[in-house]
Image (cartoon, helix red, strand yellow):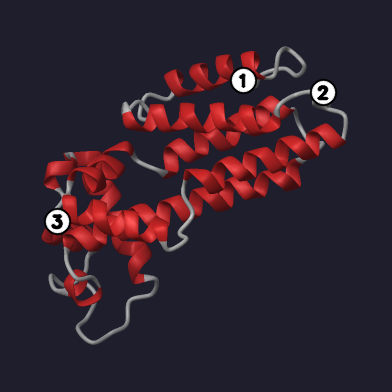
Amino acid sequence: MSPRGVAIPDLRGRLFAAAERVVARDGAMALTSRAITAEADCGKGVLHAHFAGLDEFVAELVLDRFARSARQAEALEAKVGQATVAANLQEVALALLEALPPAVVGLAMTRPAAALHTRQGFQAGAPAFDAIQHAFTVYLQGEQRGGRLPADADAATIALALVGTIHHLLMTGVSGRSEEPKATTGRLLAVLLGGAVQSAP
């Protein structure tokens, strides 16, 4: 356990990662302040010293993971012209499903105070699905300019459909089953891209 009075590097990240491990191993109902700090090997009062309570902590975890996911989606723009369009999109889509554990997102939505804090964060400008959708659209438009996607393809609608599928997979809690999300996103991309590019293997 970290000694009393010694600063813990990246405490938020350490607590967030610990919470995800607790939920993955023991389920959402097992997520308590004590379970989180024990998993993070921190003092029992550390979480409440940095967050108003478990609800705020859960909301901040969700906001943090959405922000990380938005950054992953934004990185797509640098991949224009590389690999295949479908492979690039699928790689990020699957990464988003891993970055946003359904049990954690569901927990934030079912705890009223956590849900309120999360909504307030989004209303204040924290990135959410709209930012991810925008990043997908920007990437697809870049591929259109490069000639790897037909000029008449509706980039915004393709991005919306892909984000909608990611949202559905998250809310139905299937991201832990690796084959189903990969197969689902692969089939979707084959339809959305109209055979113009090949899906990831």
Spatial distance from mark 1 to mark 2, Cα to Cα? 14 Å
Picture layout, residue 50 above or below residue 84: below
Query: Residue most toward the bottom?
Result: 5
Residue type of the residue flagged with mark 1: Leu
Q: Position of residue 125 (x, y in %)?
A: 47, 61
Residue at the front extreme? 123
Give the mark toward the camera: 1 or 2.
Answer: 2
Instruction: Provide residue 16's location: percent of width, then percent of height.
Output: 32, 58
Q: From the viewer's side, name the closer residue of 131 and 187.
A: 131
Query: Which of the marked residues, 3 or 2, is nearer the chain's N terminus?
Result: 3
Residue 81, picture quadrant: top right
User: Is residue 190 positioned above or below 50 on the image?
Assistant: above
Q: Which residue is mark 2?
A: 150
Q: Quadrant of residue 102?
A: top left
Instruction: Determine whether the residue tagged by mark 3 lies in a helix, strand or loop.
Output: helix
Which of disc 1 and disc 3 is earlier in sequence?
3
Q: CA distance from mark 3 to mark 1?
A: 40 Å
In the picture, the disc for residue 112 is none
Rendered residue at 35%/29% (across/down): 176
Q: Which residue is mark 3?
A: 35
Q: Bin the neighbour count of mark 2 within 10 Å (Cα to Cα): few under 14, some 14-19, many 20 and up.
A: some
- Please name whichever residue, 130 or 67, is drawn nearer the observer in this view of the structure: 130
Q: Bin the neighbour count of mark 1 within 10 Å (Cα to Cα): few under 14, some 14-19, many 20 and up.
A: many
Asked which quadrant contains residue 156, the reply is top right
Query: Is residue 99 toward the left or the right of residue 120 in the image?
Result: right
The residue labelled by disc 1 is: 189
Mark 2: amino acid: Pro
At label 3, counting other C-alpha atoms closer than 10 Å, the crowd grade (few under 14, some 14-19, many 20 or more) is: some
Element under label 2? loop
